[in-house]
Amino acid sequence: MHKGCVIWFTGLSGAGKSTVSRLVAERLRAQGAKVELLDGDEVREHLSKGLGFSKEDRDENIRRIGFVCELLARNGVIAIAAAISPIARCARSCANGSPILWKCTRSALWKCWRSAT
């Protein structure tokens, strides 16, 4: 059994978090790893439906993603999260002992703006 961990991609909207995280997940699966991807947009639609974009709601969304990631990692799954998220809040959400790798996905601001419109 593989050891579980959390790989958390963060960055601006349109910076490529989902694209890069999908590629990483595919590569890891090709190597035989158990991988689950929690994309921020999909989580917001299914797990966090009804939450808005206030600071409290955004924090709750991140807390839920962190909780699921920690649960998966604790059970030998590589949990990949892709969400707009302050790293400090993510750390508090996943701080139950599983290894965490943070990756900030960067893109030129104009590219993020273009992909969001």
Image (cartoon, helix red, strand yellow):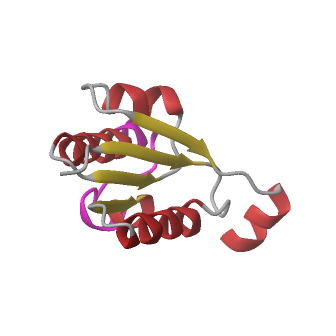
- Identify the residue at image location x=27%, y=44%: 4
Q: Position of residue 28 (x, y in %)?
A: 41, 63
The image shows residue 90, relative to residue 65, as above or below, that is above
Q: Position of residue 50 (x, y in %)?
A: 28, 58
Q: 7 or 54: which is nearer to us? A: 7
- Identify the residue at image location x=38%, y=67%: 31
Q: How many marks?
A: 0
In this picture, residue 56 sits left or right of residue 36: right
Q: Is residue 117 visible?
A: no
The image shows residue 1, relative to residue 115, as above or below, that is above
- Identify the residue at image location x=48%, y=26%: 88
- Identify the residue at image location x=32%, y=32%: 93
Judge whether residue 41 is colored magenta: no
In this picture, residue 76 sits left or right of residue 20: left
Q: Position of residue 67 (x, y in %)?
A: 24, 40
Quadrant of the drawing holding the C terminus: bottom right
In this picture, residue 52 sits left or right of residue 76: right
Q: 32 or 87: which is nearer to us? A: 32
Which stretch did the figure color magenta? 44-59
- Examine the image and state in which quarter residue 19 appears: bottom right
Q: 69 or 33: which is nearer to us? A: 33
Q: Is residue 85 visible?
A: yes
The image shows residue 33, relative to residue 90, as above or below, that is below
The image shows residue 29, relative to residue 101, as above or below, that is below
Q: Position of residue 79 (x, y in %)?
A: 33, 52
Judge whether residue 45 is colored magenta: yes
